[in-house]
Image (cartoon, rainbow, N blue to C red):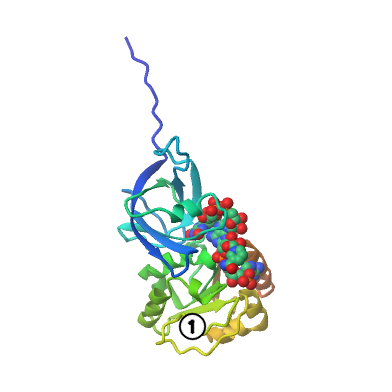
Amino acid sequence: MIQPTVATAAPRYTEQVVTHKTAWGTEKLFSLTVTRPPGFKFVPGQFARLGLALDPAAPETPNEWRAYSMVSAPNENSLEFYSVVVPNGTFSPPMAQLRVGDALWINNSVFGFLTLDAFADGDDLWLMATGTGLSAYLSMLRDPATFTRFKRIILVHGVRYAIELAYRDELLSLMQRHAGQLIYLPITTQEPLTQGLSPSLSLNSLAPARLTTLLRTGELEQRAGVSLDPSHARVMLCGNPEMVTEMRGLLSERGFAAGRRGVPGNLAVENYW
Ligand SMILES: Cc1cc2nc3c(=O)[nH]c(=O)nc-3n(C[C@H](O)[C@H](O)[C@H](O)COP(=O)(O)OP(=O)(O)OC[C@H]3O[C@@H](n4cnc5c(N)ncnc54)[C@H](O)[C@@H]3O)c2cc1C
Ligand SMILES: NC(=O)c1ccc[n+]([C@@H]2O[C@H](COP(=O)([O-])OP(=O)(O)OC[C@H]3O[C@@H](n4cnc5c(N)ncnc54)[C@H](OP(=O)(O)O)[C@@H]3O)[C@@H](O)[C@H]2O)c1
């Protein structure tokens, strides 16, 4: 007699383990390094869906999922994620409580189009982020291939306070390693930028200003020492959706547009909420 086959769905996710945790000098920001599932492939700029088991009645079953950009480069053995703790958030406060050895679930699929293949080659790559929008760019900057495609890379990171300039030491040392090719441009909105950076970076006090204001006034280009010309610049925007909308409007007035139907553009964006 032929036995009926019972279809067992392959799990859509795997359980991984936290191996390292970094606090960024403010209780609001942290990073987690976790084991990497076998065969988990991604392109810098893509994101994973992370799961937590928040129902005490089912501590082995993830029931809340959120998108997180990979910070780690594709060739690293582990995965790294960078997070803000949203006050009263469902996911980020318990994620911030995780300790080394705790479980974190990862969906098998990766997602996202904020990747460098959105662009034709160009001279200047502008990576503009607010807050944790930096995550996606860290993966790109840790990947040596990024530096072979563009003559100059300008990373603009906007935060409220200098203490929120996470990964600044890594970015400063990358800037030294790629001297003349990588420009790291931190900006603060709630205090002047006079501290919190390496003393090796000579920096006059910079007035607090939003990215949008700096673009409107021309000070962004002035601070970078690079003109933002749509004929040879490629721009990515990532983070706060209001920033993305306003910046997209300002940039479109200057001739920047996303690609369409397989034709690469010079603008790519991702909203974090
Ligand atoms: C494609 C994508 C990639 C993402 N990558 C990251 C990442 O690398 N790091 C990260 O911290 N978050 C990232 N997020 C946001 C993340 O998925 C969660 O929203 C975040 O962890 C908060 O979850 P929550 O349940 O605590 O709050 P939620 O209920 O999800 O959000 C509540 C509110 O908090 C605010 N908020 C949410 N996320 C952020 C944020 N990142 N920064 C500032 N305010 C925020 C918004 O006002 C939102 O309405 C990403 C989101 C998307 C869509
Ligand atoms: N850190 C705080 O003091 C504070 C205060 C209230 C709420 N929160 C909450 O804490 C969470 C994380 O906050 P976050 O500071 O990491 O992220 P965020 O709120 O996205 O702010 C990050 C940076 O983006 C700037 N920004 C916001 N909207 C913009 C726009 N339309 N154009 C250009 N720049 C813009 C902010 O400038 P501005 O400073 O000018 O807004 C800030 O420098 C959020 O849930 C937020 O609501 C934080």
Q: Position of 133 compared to 36: left or right?
A: right
Residue 251 in the image, given as x and y percentages of width and height:
65, 72
Quarter of the image with the N terminus is top left
Q: Is residue 43 above or below residue 145?
A: above
Q: Quarter of the image holding residue 261? A: bottom right
What element does badge 1 sit on?
loop
Q: Position of 249 compared to 166: left or right?
A: right
Disc 1 residue crowd, few under 14, some 14–19, many 20+, Cα 10 Å: few
Quarter of the image with the C terminus is bottom right
Question: Which residue lies most toward the top here?
Answer: 1
The residue located at (41%, 62%) in the rendering is 31
Residue 226 in the image, given as x and y percentages of width and height:
54, 84
As shown in the figure, which amino acid type bears the numbered disc 1? Gln
CB of residue at label 1: within 8 Å of ligand 2? Answer: no
Q: Is residue 263 visible?
A: no
Q: Which quadrant of the figure shows ligand 1? A: bottom right
Q: Is residue 229 above or below residue 145?
A: below
Residue 24 in the image, given as x and y percentages of width and height:
43, 68
Q: Is residue 160 or residue 5 the one in the foreground?
A: 160
Q: Is residue 119 or residue 170 the one in the foreground?
A: 170
Q: Is residue 25 above or below residue 109?
A: below
Question: Which residue is disc 1 drawn over?
Answer: 195
Q: Is residue 240 above or below residue 158?
A: above
Q: Is residue 187 visible?
A: yes
Mark count: 1
Residue 152 in the image, given as x and y percentages of width and height:
46, 79
Q: Quarter of the image holding residue 253? A: bottom right
Q: Position of 250 compared to 166: left or right?
A: right
